[in-house]
Amino acid sequence: MSELLLSIINFLTSTMTGITGLGGGMILAGVMPMFLPTVAIIPVHGATQLASNASRAWFGRRHVDMTYIKPYLIGTLIGAVVFGILVRFIKLDLIPLLIGFYILLTQWSHKFNELLKSFENFGVIGFLQTGIGLFVGAPGPMHMPLLIKKYNDNHVVVSTASAMISIVHLIKLIMYVSMGFVFMDYWRVIVMMIIGAIIGSWVGTKLRHRMPMPWLKRILPWLLTIIAIKIIADNVIKLNFF
């Protein structure tokens, strides 16, 4: 049952990201602690988000601009080396809490978002998104403000952003394999979620051309806040902080 629910959720979040270009991966990262053991959250999230973003980039491939992909790729590779060492020292039980607090900061802290937006270099952004992705799963739309500055066409922004984030999730999977995570132990949920992700990417790409649905962006912060508070509350109790 959990596999089916996660597949449906991934379909919905992938569809939303296909329309708006952001938010779906973060919602999924916030929901997954309710269904999976802590050790599996980030790697399974990475596998499904790779499918979601890569399929979205493929469906919108005629809009993907490769101009800034190379510096972004270099940044992600450096980030994999640096943060790949650091992630080995993080207690896995703390990952859901990191996800919850990261979501709240991105939604409600102006200073935090201004800090993230200040890195107007695709190499630096690739470096940071790789690190954030290894720790909390969804690296957030750090690259979106810069892409929006570079392109006036929303289809180019969304498709190019999806191609970039696909690189981050691919590197994340390689890192977790190197740390000994066995993806075959979760093959059922991964396959189900990948199916939902790909169908959602296709639907989202079609709706982006016909129904922009701006209201999705307005409700996103509140939906993410509810999810983040639930994650934090559940895990504070679980870890016996009080």
Image (tube, rainbow, N blue to C red):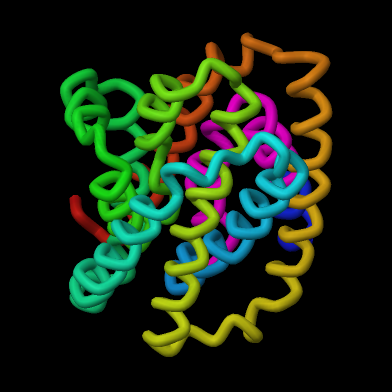
Is residue 117 on the magenta stretch? no
The quarter of the rendered structure image containing the N terminus is bottom right
Picture layout, residue 37 above or below residue 22: below
Picture layout, residue 87 above or below residue 53: below
Left or right side of 65 for 100:
left
Report the residue at 72% width, 39% height from top: 62
The image position of residue 193, as x and y in percent, is 72, 59
Report the residue at 29% width, 45% height from top: 125
Report the residue at 68% width, 26% height from top: 19
The image position of residue 169, as x and y in percent, is 49, 61
Looking at the image, which is closer to me, 235 or 218? 218
Total labels: the figure holds 0
Looking at the image, which is closer to me, 60 or 233? 60
Q: Which residues are magenta?
A: 10-36
Q: Quadrant of residue 157?
A: top right
Judge whether residue 173 can be spotted in this image: yes
Q: Quadrant of residue 102?
A: top left
Magenta stretch: helix, strand or loop mostly: helix
Left or right side of 15 for 38:
left
Report the residue at 43% width, 68% height from top: 172
Q: Quadrant of residue 79?
A: bottom left
The image position of residue 191, as x and y in percent, is 76, 68
Is residue 14 on the magenta stretch? yes
The image position of residue 199, as x and y in percent, is 83, 47
Picture layout, residue 59 above or below residue 211: below
Looking at the image, which is closer to me, 76 or 113? 76
Left or right side of 177 for 232:
left
Judge whether residue 238 can be spotted in this image: no
